[in-house]
Amino acid sequence: AEYGQRLVVKRCSMSSTGAGEDECSRISVAVRCRPLSVSERNNEVFDICRVMDQRLVILLDPGAASNDYLRHDKSKEKRFAFDQAFDAETGNQRLFEATTQPLIGRLVQGFNCSVFAYGSTGAGKTFTMIGTEQEPGVMSRTVDCLFAEFASDPSVSVVCCFVEVYNEVLWDLGSQDGREGMLDLREDPVTGPSLTGVTELQAQSVEDVMKLLQGGNQRRTTEPTVMNVTSSRSHAVFQVRVERRDREATTLGKLSLIDL
């Protein structure tokens, strides 16, 4: 979408040892309108994007303010409805709370979940998912929430990995040299699809995860575009695996956070 990036939240079937499958699944689509870029503001570009009722996005007719009276009865205004809609002033914390935080409890119960951001170049996908040190994205906030809720529970372990998909090849962004970390995708009879040889981080703190994300993001394939001089030319997948062990069963849930 030219006016921003979309965040798609998908809840999938339960995957655990000693537990049955839950057929419940749901897909939710949220959109955040991006602010005008520096070049757009310098060129006095008019922002036509409006958000109403946290669900409706209205794209105003760019020619509505003109003096062409022939257009007055031929408005090109467009409206789009989403499960959730946010304006350009919405921060990553609010976006995380509305879209991804509700999945945390399901993840520990053994559900496999996915959250992925997609949109045009320069829409803010990487800012939303990875963020910055000053404004962390959905990925680091997810792990922060996990530690806040389960840090004192010794039965819960959190393992993370960070992978790039470029030209249909998988690269390990968690290795010291991402260019040498080519990976193979294989099917595991117990845990499902898995990456052979991927670097996994037994996360002990949010700082460990931020270091993994920032280091891996610097190793991603980039190429300058008109909208973004450091545009990512690949897809990034950050996977969080949460395992809970007790006397009766072992529950395993995966959350895949994807920057398209």
Image (cartoon, helix red, strand yellow):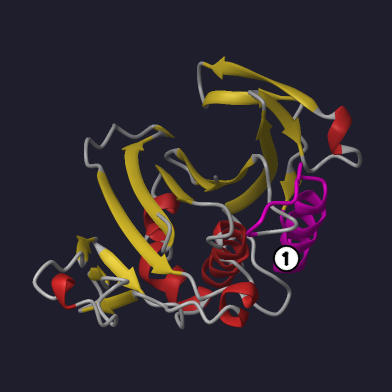
Whole-percent x and y of residue 80?
A: 22, 61
SS category of the residue bearing label 1: loop
Whole-percent x and y of residue 85?
A: 31, 69
Q: Quadrant of residue 50?
A: bottom left
Q: Is residue 254 magenta?
A: no
Q: Quadrant of residue 79?
A: bottom left
Where is 171 relative to 48, above or below?
above
The residue positioned 28% from the left and 76% from the top of the image is 51
Residue at the far right: name it: 176
- The quadrant of the rendering that contains the N terminus is bottom left
Whole-percent x and y of residue 189?
A: 51, 16
Whole-percent x and y of residue 205?
A: 72, 65
Report the residue marked by disc 1. Answer: 205
Q: Amino acid at mark 1?
A: Ser
> Camera-side residue: 230 or 248?
230
Q: Is residue 260 left or right of residue 218?
A: left
The residue positioned 12% from the left and 66% from the top of the image is 74
Q: Is residue 226 left or right of residue 156?
A: right
> Camera-side residue: 153 or 88?
88
Q: Quadrant of residue 68?
A: bottom left
- The quadrant of the rendering that contains the C terminus is top right
Q: Is residue 100 left or right of residue 202?
A: left
Q: Is residue 217 magenta?
A: yes
Q: Please count the marks in the image.
A: 1
Binning the other alpha carbons within 10 Å of mark 1 as few (below 14), some (14 to 19) or many (20 upward) gives some
The residue stretch that appears in magenta = 203-227
Residue at the far left: name it: 73
The residue positioned 36% from the left and 63% from the top of the image is 31
